[in-house]
Structure formats: C-alpha cells, structure tokens
Amino acid sequence: MNAKKITLSTISAALLCLASLSSHAATIFSQDFEAGLGANEATSGAFVQNTSGFGNNGTTMMGHAASYTNDSYAYYQISNLALTGSNVQLSFNYAAQFENRYDGFNVKIGNSVVTPTASSAMQYLQNVMEDGFSNPLAGQLFFDSSNSPYGLAQFDLSAFSGTTVDIRFQFGSDLSVVSSGINLDNIVITSEVKTSNAVPEPTSFALLGLGLAGLGLSRRKRT
C-alpha cells in the first residue's frame, strides 16, 4: 500500500510539473545616444554625444565631434553592468579615422582588452603605440582604422558572464599626426537566458490523464 502511495504520488508530481525550460535572447544593455546617458554611463576627454563627428549617420553618436588633438585620451564607459545568462554578445556600429599604428582605440573590461570576434569588421593589431604619455592604451592591442574605417564591431563577452563589470571604450593619440577620430552608435549587449515555458506538449496531457485515472482507480479500491 505504501509503495502504491509513493508511486502514485511521484507520478502525479512529475506529471503536474509540465513547465519546461527554454532559451531566448535577452537585451542586457542598449544605447543609441538619442535620449542622453544613463546613471551608469560616463564620458571623459573629447568623447561626447554629437551629430557632427566623422561618419555621422544622421543620428546622435558617441565619440569625437571634431578632430582629436595630440597627446589625447578619451573614453565612454558603462559601469556596474551585470552580465547575466550565457552567450553574452556586444555589438556596435563605428566610423573611425586616425593615424594608423600610432593612435588607437580598444574596448576594455577591467584590465582585459577584449578581442573582436572573427565575424567582426573591427580587427585589432598587436603594436606598441609610440607615444610620449602613459595611458591604458600604451603597448596594448588596438584598432587600426586603415583596415576598416566603417563597420559593425562584435565581441564575445561570455567569459565575463555572471560578473558585474565596467566596460570602457577608449581612444588615445600620440604626439604628431591628428585626424577625425572615432564615433560609436547602436551599442547592444545581449545574452541567452532560461525561461519557463508553461505550455505543455500533447503527450504531457495524455500522461497526465493516465496518471489521474490511475489515481482514481486506487481510491476506488480503498473504498
């Protein structure tokens, strides 16, 4: 009798748990710079919201509104961003024009320079910037605008999933040639998250019916 009770109880619990887990894409962060900056966003140096900089696409961008100067450092930063879920991806549109191999741009999370994915239009080069100042760009991977002055940059941030990070989009120049700079737009960070799917499959309904029928027969025998 106890075995029957346990069996029916187990079956009933399993059949009543009809919700299943599925994955879907979720947006962790998005910014097109049309409505200003959020509380966790900041800029420094010549990086400003503008509609007049290099590569203007008719909407507000983030970056250089005019040609940058010698010995400059500027950045746009998203702070205290919780990266949840799996397959965390960062993408943004860019337009860039600066002195190759001497001035540069990169994306940093903490002390790590994040490398673009193979599908990204933006590709980094390993070069030492020959500058007369010490900023976070010196000696690190940086983007060479001669390779792709326009495009869609894509980064896989999955290694940082489950952590809260500061993401810095930064630029630095040396002491000689200057140019138009870089502008960013349509920054999006997405991930895959697990959600409950409460719609049971037809087979689940059939199994539930059998389980309830068995439960009814068991009650009849006891009476």
Image (spheres, rainbow, N blue to C red):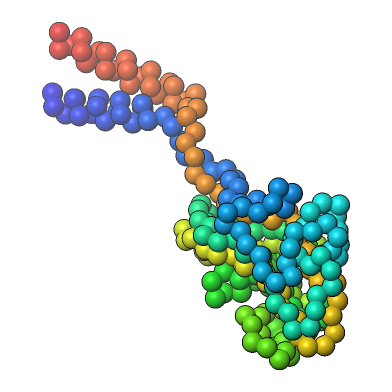
Whole-percent x and y of residue 55?
86, 62
Q: Residue 117: x and y, percent?
A: 68, 66
Q: Decide which of 148, 56 is in the foreground and name it.
A: 56
Residue 129 image-quadrant placement: bottom right
Q: Is residue 105 left or right of residue 192?
A: right
Q: From the viewer's perspective, tell me whether residue 177 is left or right of residue 10.
A: right
Residue 105 drawn above or below residue 199:
below
The percent coordinates of residue 44 (x first, y second) are 66, 69
Percent x, y for residue 204? 44, 26
Q: Is residue 145 visible?
A: no
Q: Quadrant of residue 14?
A: top left
**Residue at 79% in and 67% down:** 64
Identify the residue shown where x is 57% and y is 69%: 109
The residue lying at 58 percent from left, 54 percent from top is 39
Tell me if residue 82 can be seen: yes
| Residue sitting nearer the eye, 223 or 165 | 165
